Amino acid sequence: MYPNIARPSILFIALAWFVPAMSMAQQLDPILKELISKGLDKSHSINVHDLDTEQAKVDQNLAKTVFLPKVTLNGSFTRLNDDITFDDDTQNLLIGTQKLLIKEAIGIPFYDPFPGNIPLKEVPNLQNKNILKSSVDLDWVLFSGLEVTNAIQASKHKEASLNYVGNAEKDKIALKIIETYDKLALVYASKRVLTTSENYLNEQEFYVKKAIGNGLATPISRKKIELAQQQLASKELEFNHNKTVLIEVLHQLTGESRENLALLDPQLQSFSTTSVSGTEKRNEIKALEEAEKASLYKSKMEKSNFIPKLALKGHYEFIEDDLSLLDPIWFIGAGIKWNVFDGFQSQLKSKKSTIESQKYREQIEEAEEMIALSIIEAQLTYESSLQNTKIVQKEIDLASATYNMVDKQFKNNLAPINDVLDALTDLEKANFKLQESFFGQRRAIANLLHAKGILTSFYN
């Protein structure tokens, strides 16, 4: 008979760390939510999506600037090899005409000679060889034939599509962080299982030593205990390796320091079925729908190439001295541009964009079918995990009762130490299976939230 040392029931100890895992949390652990937030801020892929969205906004502004007047200041200096003048006959004609006008003005008869004391103006050059110019031009599109309007709408829907793509990427990153966090919680749960086993091995070692001292057991029993302790130490080493790897993964995903992550003590908590009620349209579907609309507006934009465009143009010269006799000082005018026939290019481009929108429609329908299937699969997986948890709990009850019975038999010399160690191993496996079941529940519920399009509300 071994000394009867008071100790808590193994079932009570197992339940001591089992109960927190069964709390029906409606939201994620605040620490996990903070890690997700840091992960979303750090993610390079999300940052790239944000930059793509900014580019789409810039495209909208570029399209809008078409209707703003463009003002251009010009300046130039040109030196010709010589002045540009009239030919000799034209110069003689201009001088003769000047003389006739003067004679008529002072009353000299037509056939009388022109007085020599009256000066004549020289014939001006058509263009001086030194040309200094400074001017301003105005170009203003008044009507683009709806091309700009459709381009702006296409760009807006493209921006919306990119936003939804970014949100879908955020959900994927959140799922990855949740999974890694839960894996870390599972590792810590295995540590608690190992700690419980270690306590019982120490207790059995105490009993065996007492029994050997009283001549009721052989040193072989102690060696078997020592072997079990070494096997347990090997499992603890594996725990440390897994912990290190998962902390490194979380560090890369979130940017949180390894020191802070090492201080975490995550718990595997399950969600209630009410927390996954309701369904929203997935971000992937929204992104495809917006891309479809963008393609349709792009098609309209390319069709509008046949609508006449109206523009205003103005010009003003600041320096008049070097202008040629034919150059105006200023002008303003309106023009119309009408592409009557462009070799079917606009029609073919519009058709290409229409086909692109049809491709998006097919992708939308396919995605909706796949999402509907994923919801069913996730729901069934979740229900299966709940049933599996109930089964494992029964296994724990059985393993606990078996261990207590074998332990009593061993102390009364009715069972060998091997039976005690086997019963302890079975209990250890059952406890760990329970934590794996909790892990499976959380994976199923996270996938179900994602499939239903409501995951974002759980980590925002």
Image: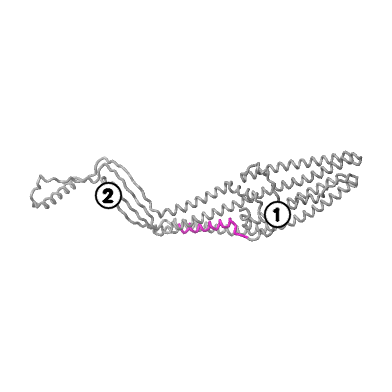
Closer to viewer: mark 2 or mark 1: 1
Q: Residues within 10 Å of mark 1 (few under 14, many from 20)?
A: many
The image position of residue 380, as x and y in percent, is 70, 58
- 36 relative position to 122: left or right: right
In this orientation, which residue lies closer to the viewer: 13 or 452?
13
> At label 2, which amino acid type do we have?
Asp
Q: Which residue in the protein does label 1 denote?
A: 270
Is residue 34 or residue 434 the one in the foreground? 34
User: In the picture, residue 240 is in which quadrant?
Assistant: top right
- Identify which residue is drawn at 66% across, 51% down: 29
In the image, residue 44 sits, relative to residue 380, either above or below, namely above
| Quadrant including the N terminus | top right
Q: Are marks 2 and 1 in contact (CB under 8 Å)?
A: no
Rate crowding at label 2 as few (under 14), some (14 to 19) or many (20 or more) other CA atoms within 10 Å: few
Mark on residue 191? none
Residue 455 lies, in percent from the top left, at 63, 55
Q: Is residue 296 magenta?
A: yes
Residue 80's place in the image compared with 304, above or below, is: above
Instruction: Estimate the x, y position of residue 280 in percent, counting from the top left.
Output: 61, 59
Magenta segment boundaries in residue numbering: 279-301
Secondary structure, mark 1, is strand
* Residue 295: in magenta span: yes
Q: Residue furthest front?
A: 6
Please state which amino acid type lies under the numbered disc 1: Ser
**For residue 327, which numbered disc appears in the image?**
2
> Please, what is the dominant secondary structure of the magenta stretch?
helix
Give coordinates of residue 364: x percent, y percent: 58, 58
Q: Earlier in the sequence, mark 2 or mark 1?
A: 1
